[in-house]
Amino acid sequence: MTKAIRMFATGGPEVMQYVDVELAAPGPGEVRVRHAACGLNFIDVYFRTGLYPQQLPAGLGQEGAGTIEAVGSGVADFKVGDRVAYAGGPNGAYAEERNMPAAKLVRLPDAIGFDTAAAMMLQGMTVQYLLRQVFPLKGGETILFHAAAGGVGLIAGQWARALGVTMIGTVSTDEKAALAKSHGCAHVINYKTENFVERVKEITGGKGVPVVYDSIGKDTFTGSLDCLARRGMMVSFGNASGPVAPFGTGELASRGSLYLTRPTLGDFVATREALDATAGDLFTMVENGQVCIEINQRYALKDVGQAHSDLESRKTTGSTILMP
């Protein structure tokens, strides 16, 4: 038996139950991973509330790091004792142990600890595909990135700085503004006290930015469009404030022939080659010190309800991990 979080209904943090689970031997193409740490991400909230549907009962969590304890048939790339990490599903990372498809795992470099890996895989690979694949930044651009003091935002600020990109970030408090600035944000806007559209136009001399990265959703979507320069790209990759309401495509035309994309990590790591390249780029940035992972919250796995409450109320900064 192993301890794991299971949900039998969608709803608030209280639907997550800390239970005993019988874990079968890994099947063909699978390995058993004993987690040293698990990651906490906003996508977990979307699954918990039912915004992203899944069949119940179900596990939660898409990110973890640990050691392989058993290997199923047909697995040639990994062996017992290997240090591994993963992100992007299937759900079930909130557990002491779990079986995982070997195709979803990457081997963890010795220089990167389990806590760091669990805190960075989903957020770090998200930043990689946003800045290097969705809208490949070359250096010299000025960009807008919402939630700049969150786990993704702090990584993005450092990565943007390393690329020679000027990042404008939005935050909700002065404390978060200072944190974002210390992690590479050139300009920080407190959207509680400032109009972020007006400030972006002021910072850019009225031109707007070529790309906006928006994980907030409903509350910032229209304003984000208004921050874009002609033929700019709106990258909507989350909806922390709720899903974006339906709108007419004329909204894009009237603002200067804008582009809109709604990417997800899975489509950028769908093959072994793509997964290794994306994770490898992240590992390099961390190993050479250009990106440092801020683990600002740690919770015991059994306290995952409090972790979700704190995440949803925006009390957290940087990355959060759960300790099995």
Image (cartoon, rainbow, N blue to C red):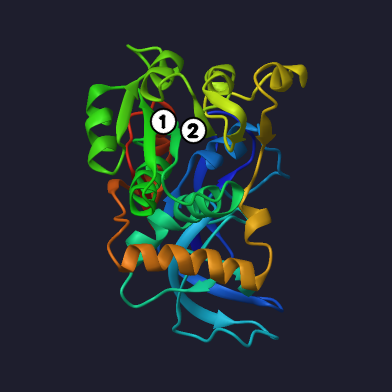
Please identify the quadrant where the C terminus is shown: bottom left
Residue 83 rendering spot, x and y as whole percentages: 43, 77
Residue in the foreground of this view, choosing between 219 and 194: 194
Residue that badge 2 annotates: 13
Residue drawn at the location 27% of the way across and 30% of the way down: 176
Q: Secondary structure at mark 2?
A: helix
Residue drawn at the location 70% of the way across and 44% of the way down: 56
* Residue 306 visible (yes or no): yes
Residue in the foreground of this view, choosing between 249 and 291: 249
Q: Which mark is nearer the camera, 2 or 1? A: 1
Q: Give amino acid for label 1.
A: Ser
**In this rendering, position of residue 87 left or right of residue 27:** left
**In this rendering, position of residue 215 left or right of residue 320:** right
Q: Quadrant of residue 181?
A: top left
Residue drawn at the location 68% of the way across and 33% of the way down: 259
Q: Residues within 10 Å of mark 1 (few under 14, many from 20)?
A: some
Query: Is the residue 190 above or below the residue 134 in the image?
Result: above
